[in-house]
Amino acid sequence: MLVKLFDSQDALGQAAAEQAATAIRRAIAAKGRARIVAATGTSQAAFLNALTQADDIDWAKVEAFHLDEYIGLPITHPASFRKILLEQLMRKVGIVNYYLLDGDAPDPVEVMRRVGRQLASSPVDVMFLGFGENGHLAFNDPPADFETEDPYILVDLDEACRRQQVGEGWFADVSQVPRQAISMSVRQILKAKELVVVVPESRKAQAVKACLEGPITPLAPGSIVRTHPNTTVYLDHDSSVLLSPTLRKALDDESQVTVNS
């Protein structure tokens, strides 16, 4: 796993977008299309904005999925991940081949199965991820299920996760945050050819330390990305402040470090 450090969230987002754009172009050149999975949240905004400005991507040849969605939240709600991705990615660049998780559907389980079948039908070329404040990966809160092979699963959101959504301004108080969500499973995430993990901001510092330097465990779900053969984690100075002095010095000296699982 490669860890890269940047001075600002904007610089981090630009660099991550350049890697993501390269992966998309490479896939289109090799096989005529690219399959991507996108994440949402305030920490992803600078990255997605930079990605939509990338040159020479034939977005009509991009097939897009997303990581997760709340159960029972309409697409008109500001926190709807479908709404965010449509506004920040699909409509901005003209992606027409996308599969949204309708968590407000009468039968969310059927939504998971239908989109999951499409997702599992062919490998994902590049996946965009982040870590939650509790270390979650997608909506796989601790202790995460590291075993299921289902592409998408129904999960209960823990208190820390729900409070993060309030802290980010999506909901007025925790009582308004849905208690369940559809989430891409951990095993499905690891099937992608390339993982681009974007983790800025000081509120993610504890999760960064646990996921990058602690044990690989369902209690720190993001730690599992260290087992993937092609993972790059993008940090800024705020999100890296709790890393060990040795790793921080190496990052300060070199701007990027290989971290073994």
Image: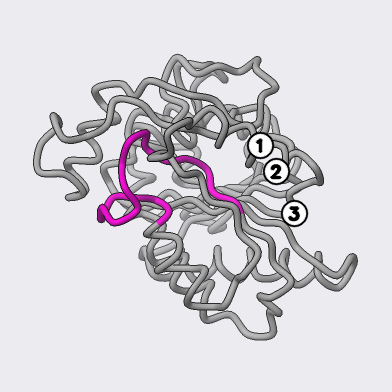
Q: Going by the picture, which residue comes out furthest to the left? A: 172
The residue that disc 2 covers is 119
Foreground: 104 or 67? 104
Residue nearer the viewer, 156 or 22:
156
**Which one is closest to the eye, mark 2 or mark 3?**
2
- Magenta stretch: give its range: 65-82
Give the structural element (helix, strand or loop) at label 3.
Answer: loop
Q: Check disc 3 and report the residue beneath it.
A: 125
> Which of the two discs, 3 and 1, sits closer to the camera?
1
Residue name at image x 74 percent, y 71 percent: 61
Q: Is residue 46 above or below residue 117?
A: below
Magenta stretch holds residue 129? no
Secondary structure of the residue carrying numbered label 1: helix
Q: In which quarter of the image is residue 18?
A: bottom right
The type of residue carrying mark 2 is Leu
**Mark 2 falls on what kind of element?**
helix
Give how far across and how far down residue 175 sits, in percent.
13, 29
Q: How far apart are marks 2 and 1 (CA)?
A: 5 Å
- Check disc 1 and give the amino acid type: Gly
Q: What residue type is labelled 3?
A: Asp
Residues at discs 2 and 1 in contact (Cβ within 8 Å): yes
Q: Measured along the vertical axis of the image, is residue 149 above or below residue 56?
A: above
Q: Which residue is drawn at 61% across and 18% down?
A: 146
Q: How crowded is mark 2: few (under 14 residues within 10 Å), some or many (20 or more)?
A: many
Furthest residue in direction right, as rendered: 30
- Image quarter (top left, top right, bottom left or bottom right) of the C terminus: top right
